[in-house]
Image (spheres, rainbow, N blue to C red):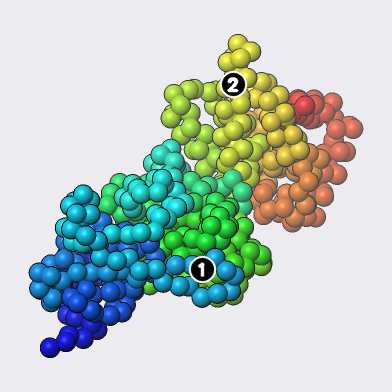
């Protein structure tokens, strides 16, 4: 009695389903299609050479047992592999992998007669022939959660990232879309998520890749007619982290292949983490179907760090590197570089190098000179926060009093001087200066500036205050 190949494979799948995880079943057995059954040889169609190799490596014994149960000891398996045709706009064609001889089986120490005639795929990250668990995650061990300072600026993103790391693919944050300006810690957080997942789940395959690297690999795959292999490689990943997805903008083919990879990973419960310089709603040049998927999970922003967070970042860096700096130097760096953590840490490293090479002790004066050279245009403008600190230190006042509503003469005078220097030494609007000085309006700031100008022309002691403060605030 002739057996129907569809029924034989269906019976095999019933047994296989009881012996593998649901994810493994969906990933490796759902896509297989039975083709025919002749002379006890069952032919199944698989999507790529890589797919065939993975089955042979990890499920060969299970396949042998199920096929033996259905077809007897003579049961054999033949693969039909879908390959990309080299001619443009033509459909994929099939390459048959015939059953091997018993001699070949013995030489390869494979329990079931299966062999391939095609060359192995070119894995984008590893030498051809290496398996899934040998993929390098491309994670930087220095970018851990332990080294990521938490503040108001990143609390939501950090908390969501930690939740994802504890339960990848098992939270509502899939994908986790982290966005913010340059140098605020998006990449650090992305690496931290990957590192934590690898520590908690060593068996999971985690991969960090920049959008630029992904695009170049896809271009190479198109050139080499290995797009199927490229897609299946990425579909193997348990946690895919792609940095700077905004660079997919305008690249229609890259977006298309990523769309299908995204769908596969999401549907099979794999975790996706993306970073960008702006939220999905503001991204230009991206397909709407892709943008809609970016919004499926959680979009969390990372903002400019507060003064306290900047000081904490510097102190953490100093502790890690085993160095000590005067408190006034640390505060000056934190007050001077306000918008970029990468620049902040770079300035600290540069300052230490300057001190070491020139054999000079690290002083506030050295810090001012270094900052001027290091950040040039951005550092020439001191921050309102730093001006307030210098003024309060000079008059020995707590900064909270300066920002309070008190009308005590000495407090009002210090507040007016801070407003005066903020207008003179920054590009901030009058409204912004007032906001920093206890929520005052622009008219109050204008009045303060006029008062200070009048006093310096008539009061010798007051003029000395301004001269002293200007020297302290000068970064030239």
For the point 43% across and 38% down, which residue is it? 142
The answer, for residue 17, to whether it is visible in the render is no
Q: Residues within 10 Å of mark 1 (few under 14, many from 20)?
A: some
Q: Earlier in the sequence, mark 1 or mark 2?
A: 1
Q: Residues within 10 Å of mark 2 (few under 14, many from 20)?
A: few
Residue 281 placement: quadrant? bottom right
Residue where numbered disc 2 is placed = 353
Q: Position of residue 232 (x, y in %)?
A: 41, 63
Q: Is residue 392 above or below residue 179?
A: above
Question: In the image, is 79 to the left or to the right of 356?
Answer: left
**Which residue is tagged 1?**
85
Q: Position of residue 460 (x, y in %)?
A: 84, 26
Q: Nearer the viewer, residue 386 or 222?
A: 222
Q: Say which element carries label 1.
A: loop
Above or below residue 403? Residue 271 is below
Measured along the vertical axis of the image, is residue 67 above or below residue 463? below
Judge by depth and name the residue closer to the eye, 121 or 433.
121
Task: Spot the residue most to the right.
Answer: 457
10 displayed left or right of 81: left
For the point 56% across and 55% down, the residue is 220
* Distance Cα–Cα, label 1 vs label 2: 57 Å
Q: Quadrant of residue 290?
A: bottom right
Q: Count how many numbered circles sit on residues in the image.
A: 2
Locate residue 312 relative to residue 405 in the image: left or right.
Answer: left
The quarter in which the N terminus is drawn is: bottom left
- 1 vs 2, front mark: 1
Q: Secondary structure at mark 2?
A: helix
Q: Residue furthest bottom?
A: 1
Q: Is the residue 85 above or below the residue 457 in the image?
A: below
Q: Is residue 384 visible?
A: yes
């Amino acid at each position: 009695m002739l057996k129907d190949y569809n029924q034989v494979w269906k019976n095999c799948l019933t047994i296989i389903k009881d012996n593998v995880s649901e994810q493994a079943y969906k990933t490796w057995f759902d896509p297989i299609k039975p083709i025919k059954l002749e002379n006890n040889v069952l032919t199944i169609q698989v999507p790529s050479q890589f797919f065939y190799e993975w089955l042979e490596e990890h499920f060969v014994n299970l396949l042998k047992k199920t096929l033996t149960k259905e077809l007897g000891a003579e049961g054999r398996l033949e693969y039909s592999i879908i390959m990309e045709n080299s001619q443009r706009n033509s459909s994929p064609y099939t390459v048959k992998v015939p059953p091997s001889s018993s001699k070949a089986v013995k030489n390869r120490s494979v329990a079931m007669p299966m062999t391939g005639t095609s060359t192995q795929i070119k894995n984008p990250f590893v030498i051809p022939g290496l398996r899934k668990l040998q993929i390098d995650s491309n994670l930087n061990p220095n970018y851990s959660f332990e080294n990521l300072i938490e503040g108001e600026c990143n609390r939501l993103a950090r908390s969501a990232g930690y939740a994802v790391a504890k339960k990848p693919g098992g939270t509502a944050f899939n994908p986790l879309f982290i966005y913010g300006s340059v140098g605020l810690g998006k990449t650090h957080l992305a690496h931290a998520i990957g590192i934590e997942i690898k520590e908690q789940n060593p068996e999971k395959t985690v991969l960090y890749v920049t959008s630029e690297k992904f695009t170049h690999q896809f271009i190479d795959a198109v050139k080499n007619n290995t797009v199927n292999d490229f897609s299946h490689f990425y579909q193997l990943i348990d946690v895919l982290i792609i940095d700077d997805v905004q660079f997919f903008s305008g690249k229609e083919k890259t977006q298309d292949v990523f769309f299908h990879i995204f769908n596969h990973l999401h549907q099979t419960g794999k975790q996706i983490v993306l970073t960008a310089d702006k939220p999905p709603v503001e991204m230009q040049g991206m397909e709407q179907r892709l943008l809609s998927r970016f919004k499926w999970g959680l979009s969390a922003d990372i903002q400019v760090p507060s003064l306290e967070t900047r000081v904490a970042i510097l102190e953490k860096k100093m502790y890690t590197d085993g160095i000590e700096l005067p408190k006034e130097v640390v505060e000056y760096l934190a007050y001077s570089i306000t918008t970029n953590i990468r620049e902040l840490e770079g300035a600290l490293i540069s300052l230490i190098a300057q001190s070491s090479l020139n054999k000079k002790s690290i002083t506030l004066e050295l810090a001012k000179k270094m900052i001027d050279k290091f950040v040039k245009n951005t550092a020439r403008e001191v921050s309102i926060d730093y001006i307030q600190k210098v003024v309060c230190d000079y008059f020995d006042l707590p900064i909270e009093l300066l920002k309070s509503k008190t009308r005590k003469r000495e407090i009002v005078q210090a507040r007016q001087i801070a407003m005066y220097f903020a207008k003179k030494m920054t590009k901030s609007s009058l409204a912004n200066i007032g906001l920093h000085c206890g929520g005052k309006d622009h008219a109050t700031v204008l009045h303060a500036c006029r008062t200070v100008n009048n006093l310096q022309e008539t009061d010798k002691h007051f003029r000395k205050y301004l001269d002293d403060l200007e020297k302290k605030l000068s970064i030239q």
